Image: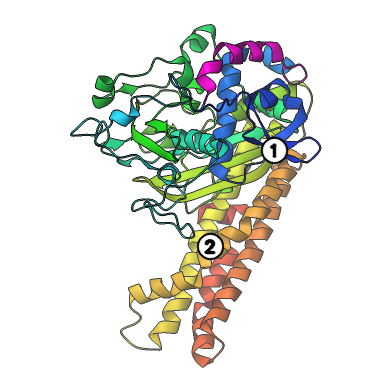
């Protein structure tokens, strides 16, 4: 059985004409101007496939200079890519006998105590959204006793995604547990062009000759031996192509729909973060920006611009420089998201589509304005927390001398969903403020508009909370007693100086 990823249709693409099509790697990479981009609904699959395409382009096109990357926007080196794909064609066969794509023939020998004792698993084991083992999901009803049947095209996408976004957890194959995928838990950001060709060019960050020489993807690397896999195979990713195809799992697909799964390489700490991740200051120093379940991208917007001692994602800086060099100041479309995993279980996944003016990236004045916008929102949120807590406390105490139990106050306030409403209502308005800044609005005008937005949002959240506790005498009494706390919140939004002093 064979399935050449170079010749068989398996990539979900959107043609420039708007039609959904499955295409081969050759179709996608030799004529990227034909395609608007990927048409994958699954957030992590979309990001994983883009990263695979970029890994191939990094190796086929070479290190190059800024001018070389600039030329890619208009002229695509299809001959170099074809030569590269032809050179490694045998290793792009999903079911190749000697070296199947991103797999290892010795995977069936896995078994922590006895070689070959680990049973093959359903392909659901490679899909974080599927029900397998003790991985619980909301809607999926996959059963371990019934192997998941997938087409070769879906198997290929599943394999690529699993290598990038695996969670750690007990596997009991060659060792005890496996490592996180290199993209897991990261807040990934990548610019997207009008066509696939532009998207690839915008994300193809520069490399030196030496960096390119060491940056080998999985299909160019020598496979680890069974002894090495049973040991401690720590290896630091050498560059984008290596990082985007790093094998944290040793897998082998079977014709009957099952898969052998064991531990793979262990990623060592790298001084260079993922090109799609911003660098922020953590408690122990610089670290990649992580995806969080309690906040979306806009609340970390300073990291996109390079403010607050952060550094934007390398792909975003590269794309902004390319666009500004050709005098294109139109907002860049961004895909941002990823997967939060914990001990092999998917906690949350997200994919946002946003726009950002390239002139704002690395702009110190824009950074200062955005930092102030977010600081005002944070200060207001804390003040609103006190006001709504006061409302809940007065509603609960009913005039008693003992007062309300703090746990009851916290529980009631949580049930009102004030925080979620506050931050959720600000998201669209924030991106509007950022677009205005990119269009040339002054910082003072943007800040004044933001203060007005905060005033309206505070009043809306307060009215919501008041409606939730009712309109009887008890509720009206609580509103009256807590009104002074609301007044303090509104007074703090009168001028930028008063907000800063709080």
Question: Seen from this angle, which residue lies furthest left?
Answer: 113
Q: Which residue is mark 1?
A: 333
Please say whether residue 67 is visible from this viewpoint. no
Magenta stretch?
72-93
**Observer-nearest residue: 21 or 194?**
21
Query: Which labelled disc corresponds to residue 420?
Result: 2
Q: Position of residue 254 (x, y in %)?
A: 43, 34
Please say whether residue 485 is visible from this viewpoint. yes
User: In this picture, is 414 found above or below 361?
Assistant: below
Q: Position of residue 233 (x, y in %)?
A: 29, 23
**Observer-nearest residue: 253 or 39?**
253
Chief SS of the magenta region? helix
**Observer-nearest residue: 377 or 319?**
319
Q: Position of residue 356 (x, y in %)?
A: 68, 38
Q: Residue at x 74, y 15 (%)?
A: 71
Left or right: residue 150 compared with residue 453: left
Specify few, some or many for label 1: CA neighbours under 10 Å numbering under 14, 14-19, or 20 or more. Answer: some
Pair 1/2: label in front: 1
User: In this picture, is 471 found above or below 47?
Assistant: below
Q: Position of residue 335 (x, y in %)?
A: 62, 40
Q: How many marks?
A: 2
Specify few, some or many for label 2: CA neighbours under 10 Å numbering under 14, 14-19, or 20 or more. Answer: few
User: In this picture, is 62 found above or below 125?
Assistant: above
What kind of element bears circle 1? strand
């Amino acid at each position: 059985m064979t399935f050449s990823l170079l010749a068989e249709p398996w990539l979900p693409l959107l043609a420039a004409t708007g039609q959904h099509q499955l295409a081969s790697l050759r179709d996608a990479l030799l004529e990227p101007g034909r395609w608007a981009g990927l048409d994958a609904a699954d957030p992590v699959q979309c990001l994983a496939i883009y990263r695979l395409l970029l890994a191939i382009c990094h190796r086929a096109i070479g290190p190059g200079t800024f001018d070389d990357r600039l030329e890619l926007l208009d002229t695509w080196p299809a001959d170099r890519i074809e030569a590269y794909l032809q050179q490694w064609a045998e290793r792009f066969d999903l079911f190749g006998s000697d070296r199947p794509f991103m797999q290892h023939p010795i995977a069936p020998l896995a078994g922590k105590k006895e070689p070959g004792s680990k049973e093959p698993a359903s392909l659901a084991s490679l899909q974080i959204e599927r029900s397998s083992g003790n991985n619980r999901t909301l809607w999926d009803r996959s059963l371990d006793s019934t192997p998941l049947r997938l087409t070769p095209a879906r198997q290929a996408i599943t394999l690529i995604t699993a290598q990038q976004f695996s969670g750690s957890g007990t596997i009991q194959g060659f060792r005890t547990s496996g490592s996180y995928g290199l993209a897991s838990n990261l807040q990934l950001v990548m610019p997207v062009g009008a066509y696939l060709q532009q998207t690839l060019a915008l994300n193809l960050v520069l490399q030196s000759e030496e960096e390119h020489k060491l940056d080998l993807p999985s299909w160019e690397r020598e496979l680890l031996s069974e002894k090495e896999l049973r040991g401690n195979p720590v290896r630091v990713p050498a560059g984008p192509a290596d990082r985007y195809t790093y094998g944290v799992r040793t897998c082998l697909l079977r014709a009957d729909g099952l898969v052998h799964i064991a531990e793979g390489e262990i990623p060592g700490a790298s001084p260079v973060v993922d090109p799609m991740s911003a660098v922020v200051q953590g408690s122990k120093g610089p670290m990649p920006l992580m995806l969080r379940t309690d906040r979306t991208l806009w609340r970390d917007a300073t990291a996109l611009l390079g403010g607050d001692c952060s550094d934007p994602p390398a792909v975003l800086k590269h794309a902004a420089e390319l666009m500004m060099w050709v005098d294109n100041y139109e907002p860049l479309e961004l895909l941002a998201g990823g997967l939060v995993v914990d001990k092999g279980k998917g906690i949350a996944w997200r994919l946002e589509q946003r726009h950002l003016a390239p002139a704002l990236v690395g702009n110190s004045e824009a950074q200062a304005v955005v930092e102030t916008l977010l600081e005002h929102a944070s200060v207001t949120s804390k003040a609103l927390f006190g006001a709504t807590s006061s409302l809940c406390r007065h509603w609960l105490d009913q005039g008693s001398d003992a007062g309300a139990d703090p746990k009851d106050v916290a529980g009631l306030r949580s049930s009102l969903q004030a925080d979620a409403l506050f931050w959720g209502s600000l998201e669209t308005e924030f991106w509007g403020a950022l677009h205005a800044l990119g269009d040339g609005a002054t910082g003072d005008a943007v800040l004044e508009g933001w203060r007005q937005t905060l005033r309206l949002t505070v009043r809306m959240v307060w009215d919501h909370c008041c409606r939730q506790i009712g309109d009887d005498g008890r509720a009206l009494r609580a509103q009256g007693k807590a009104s002074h706390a609301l007044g303090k919140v509104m007074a703090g939004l009168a001028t930028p100086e008063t907000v800063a002093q709080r």
